[in-house]
Amino acid sequence: MPTRPLVDRDLPEAQHMVRRAFGTFMGVTDLDNFWTDFDYVYGRFGCEHTAAFGADHDGALAGVNFCTNWGSVGFFGPLSVRTDLWNRGIAQPLVAAVSDQFGRWGTRHAGLCTFPQSTKHVWLYQKFCFYPRHLTAVMAAPAASVGTLPKEARYSVLSPGERRDADAASRALTDEIYDGLDLRAEIRTCAARNLGDTLLLWEGSDRLAGFAVCHWGSASEAGADCLFIKFGAVRPGQGASDRFGALLDAAGVLARDAGMATVLAGVNTGREPAYRQMMARGFRSRMHVIIMNRPNAPGYSGPEDFVLDDWR
Ligand SMILES: CC(C)(COP(=O)(O)OP(=O)(O)OC[C@H]1O[C@@H](n2cnc3c(N)ncnc32)[C@H](O)[C@@H]1OP(=O)(O)O)[C@@H](O)C(=O)NCCC(=O)NCCS
């Protein structure tokens, strides 16, 4: 089955399909009100670092898939097929389409996250040489009740020149964690589309200790009353654990400032010290997903990595 780039006029149907497909798989009864408090389609479509594909059946959209470019790292999803067409081979060309896109981007470390309990999902992605690794815990904790953030902690208030400096500092930081990992486009998109803000943790006046791309609001990927850290990381090496704690504290303050009750963040359990620290700080898992990597390598999910993301 051929695939094609998704276009603007597909978006309402794509949004509907994503909600129906995931809701049906998860056994939801009230499908009309499922996942209506956040968005994966409009916010990911047409960004500088994303691509989206559709597959048609009898002249109508039958499946969609999205992929995201974080420099040397790329991930895909949400992959969704119309529920009446499952198990007819529609998903597989859509996985092939994002695989081709990773090739065009020069992605060296590709992946996805999926449902660990589903033999179908794991089988499907293994056909494309993605292999399961550690679980990722998607964890939540209450927003902070005390604390303040300095003005320069928020990317959105920076001047264009200061934003370029912050972008470059984030690039240097992520490059230290994993060669070529690059969140600059994610940071710019978050600001340009008003999906939330990027939290910047500075040491002194110009050394970036950590950052977190945070979503909130119904146009974002966060969900009601929630600040979601789409990606967060601190500078590796000595003191990384303390910097990670400071980043989590600051995210709690930002959540409160944004009027959100909860901080939500994913941590791969291969990043054991980071995972343990989150539990010790009162974060509790809301769900587990499993990441599948191609090649089958840890990427930036080793014990030395103080990184937050879940590739949902
Ligand atoms: C997951 C999803 C995208 C798959 O789409 P699909 O079009 O049904 O998938 P395909 O038909 O292309 O491929 C499914 C494969 O899984 C196999 N399969 C089906 N049930 C299986 C099971 N219980 N165990 C193992 N393999 C199974 C099929 O036989 C097929 O493999 P094959 O071609 O080697 O025989 C679709 O079911 C969906 O939209 N689900 C809800 C949303 C979702 O879960 N998205 C993905 C999140 S990561």
Image (spheres, grey):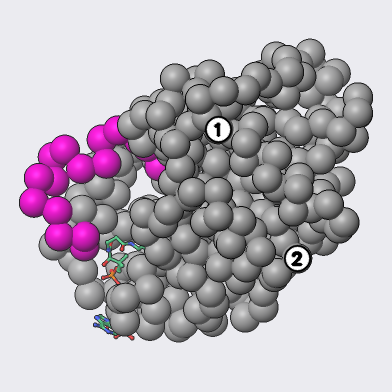
Q: Residue at x 55, y 32 (%)?
A: 252
Structural crowding at the residue carrying mark 2, measured as other residues with C-alpha within 10 Å and reported as few (<14), some (14–19) or many (≥20): some
Q: Is residue 140 visible?
A: yes
Label drawn at residue 212: none
Residue at 40% across, 42% down = 40
Q: CB of mark 1 within 8 Å of CB of mark 2? A: no
Please report whichever mark, 1 or 2, sits nearer to the chain's N-terminal start: 1
Q: Quadrant of the N terminus?
A: bottom left
Q: Residue at x 78, y 23 (%)?
A: 163
* The magenta segment: 25-40
Q: Position of residue 86 (x, y in %)?
A: 21, 69
Q: Mark 1 — residue? A: 252
Q: Secondary structure at mark 2?
A: loop
Cα distance in 3D space between marks 1 and 2: 23 Å
In the displayed orientation, state which residue is furthest to the left: 29
Task: Indicate whether residue 233 is drawn in magenta.
Answer: no
- Residue 188 location in percent, x, y? 67, 30
